[in-house]
Amino acid sequence: MNTKIMGYNFTEILTHFNINSGVPEVKPFGSGHINDTFLVKTSAENGRDYLLQKINHFVFKNIEGLMNNMVYITNHLKKKTIEKGDPEKEVLTLVECDNGKYYYEDKQGNYWRMTYFLRDTQSYDLVTTGQQAYQGGVAFGRFQYLLCDLYPGVLVDVIPDFLNIEKRLNDLEKAIENDSAGRVKSVKHQLEFLLSRADVMKEILVMGKAGVLPLRITHNDTKFNNILLDKNNNIQCVIDLDTVMPGYVAYDFGDAIRSIINTAVEDEKDLDAIQLNIPLFSEFTKGYLSQTISFLTEQELKSLMKGVMLLPYMQAVRFLTDYLEGDVYYKIHFAKHNLQRTLAQIQLLKMLELNKKELTDIVESEWLNLQNSLSTEQSAQL
């Protein structure tokens, strides 16, 4: 085995995980931006391989809390899955360490965790078919459904205020006031656009604080590539559970739609290329509601479109804040990259606003269709 990749001593690290098999190969895996991931090939008779991850403790400062969250969530998901599915395939399986915990701290202060590698799965960065969009909706809707009976207070906020728009707007106001990079004057129109919508974009938070929207356990990073599909493009497993913590269902719905509905990339330079793929929106919504209709409240249903508007808005606020602060948070690949990202997210929001009624009608129509189907099934059983 190549014992050192990127300076890490895998021979030493792997001895602390209970895998009980030889390891002929370790190699980098995937393209994640936060954690470093490695595929651990073993000589186990059952053919089991593993994924080893170095947790980014600069982003996730409470490693103990983060891993306790993951253990709690995966254990619950496995219990809920065992009756009608295969927990080892449909839920991430964490590997215990020799210290009884599910992470190991090496001598350099790096933190490591390990999960089973799920064979014969695939993920996509872009949604290109209605089947994929529908399965994405099923995946994240089912994830919320399986966790809806858990009390959110048992989980740690691994990144406090991660999707708190009040906090993000406060950060923007500070960046405007400090103007450390001397860029405020050049983005006057973008600031006017964003700040004019500030009160509307706080509605989910206000409804939550008033108890109108229940706090639930949400994924909080519902990019499509955080779903593993089987070889037939059917949902198998939701992954990347680092940001699972208390939140509102509209956050997950809105974040998924932000990437699925956009016909262009997140930092598209040609703003005219940013259009809405409404058929994909419809399919995702259908899949999502098919899993959540049994527990969503009427107010949560109404909040979904608020989430669709909020998430691109919040991302624009974050990109512009970083641009005003001199590009200190997001990696940029050229000058004004954060500004280009901001403009693209603003354009997406404008398109969503123009088509809001049609999108809202789709959500309400799918909800009504599912309710009618349930009523018909219930009547037939009497």
Image: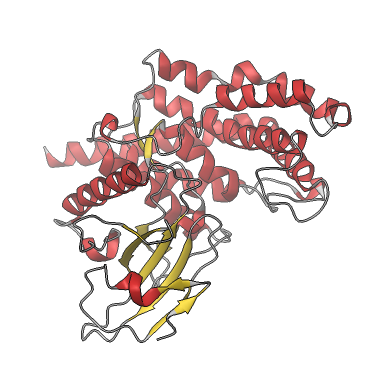
- Asked if residue 88 is positioned above or below residue 347 in the image, the reply reads below
Q: Quadrant of residue 210?
A: top left
Q: Nearer the viewer, residue 323 or 100?
A: 100
Quarter that holds the C terminus: top left
Residue 117 at least partly seen: no
Q: Nearer the viewer, residue 190 or 358?
A: 190
Q: Position of residue 42 (x, y in %)?
A: 31, 82
Residue 325 at least partly seen: yes
Q: Nearer the viewer, residue 244 or 382?
A: 244
Q: List the single residue furthest toward the front.
A: 107
- Asked if residue 126 is positioned above or below residue 153 in the image, the reply reads below
Is 306 situated left or right of 77 in this image? right
Q: Residue at x 58, y 35 (%)?
A: 311
Count of numbered circles on the image: 0
Is 228 situated left or right of 382 in this image? right
Q: Residue at x 23, y 73 (%)?
A: 19
Q: Position of residue 24 (x, y in %)?
A: 36, 87
Q: Residue at x 51, y 72 (%)?
A: 7
- Asked if residue 17 is positioned above or below residue 170 in the image, the reply reads below
Q: Quadrant of residue 111?
A: bottom left
Q: Residue at x 21, y 69 (%)?
A: 18
Quarter that holds the N terminus: bottom left
Q: Position of residue 337 (x, y in %)?
A: 78, 48
Q: Position of residue 104 (x, y in %)?
A: 32, 59
